[in-house]
Amino acid sequence: MTDQLIEQAIQMRSKAIAPYSKYKVGSAILTVSGKIFGGCNVESSSYGLTCCAERIAIYNAVSNGHTKFSALAVATNNGGKPCGACRQVIWDICGEISIYITDVSGNINNTTSSELLPNAFDKSSL
Ligand code: THU
């Protein structure tokens, strides 16, 4: 299942709309029920409106009725890690999950939500 998840993230990179940064990102999220949902980054000429691949994958899954997740994969050219905004959303929506970050050479970095966002702010603080 992890292989499929990573493969889906790699495939999603080809759907990215990234004419400004040229940095294509693909992502895929695995639900506890075994379904995979993908996302890619979508940039806007008003740069701040850009949305990252990870958040699009998560919102894709959530908008298809899923709320429990077990893993997320991210694919970039160089193995770049999720941005701070995505780390917060991953923690808020997915909690502690496995995260696989891959590059075009096939290197895979295994991490977790809490490793990416230690001492997170979340609903328990409200
Ligand atoms: N990007 C992502 O899709 N995910 C991240 O976690 C980091 C950044 C995108 C946003 C923008 O389209 C491009 O990468 C360069 O920042």
Image (tube, grey):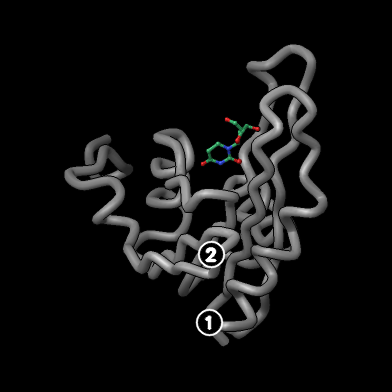
Q: Quadrant of the N terminus?
A: bottom right
Task: Determine whether label 1 and label 2 are within 8 Å by CB.
Answer: yes
Q: Which mark is residue 65?
A: none
Q: Position of residue 29 (x, y in %)?
A: 59, 66
- The numbered mark, 1 or 2, whose residue comes first in the sequence reads 1
Which quarter of the figure has residue 67?
bottom right
At horizontal 40% and vertical 41% (from top left) the residue drawn is: 88
Q: Secondary structure at mark 2?
A: strand
Indicate the amino acid at tag 2. Answer: Ala
- Of 92 and 56, nearer the camera is 56
Q: Which mark is residue 73?
A: 2
As drawn, is 37 to the left or to the right of 111?
A: right
At horizontal 64% and vertical 47% (from top left) the residue drawn is: 25
User: Crowding at label 2, few (<14), some or many (≥20) Cα neighbours within 10 Å?
Assistant: many
Q: Quadrant of the C terminus?
A: top left
At horizontal 62% and vertical 57% (from top left) the residue drawn is: 27
Q: Position of residue 93 (x, y in %)?
A: 47, 53
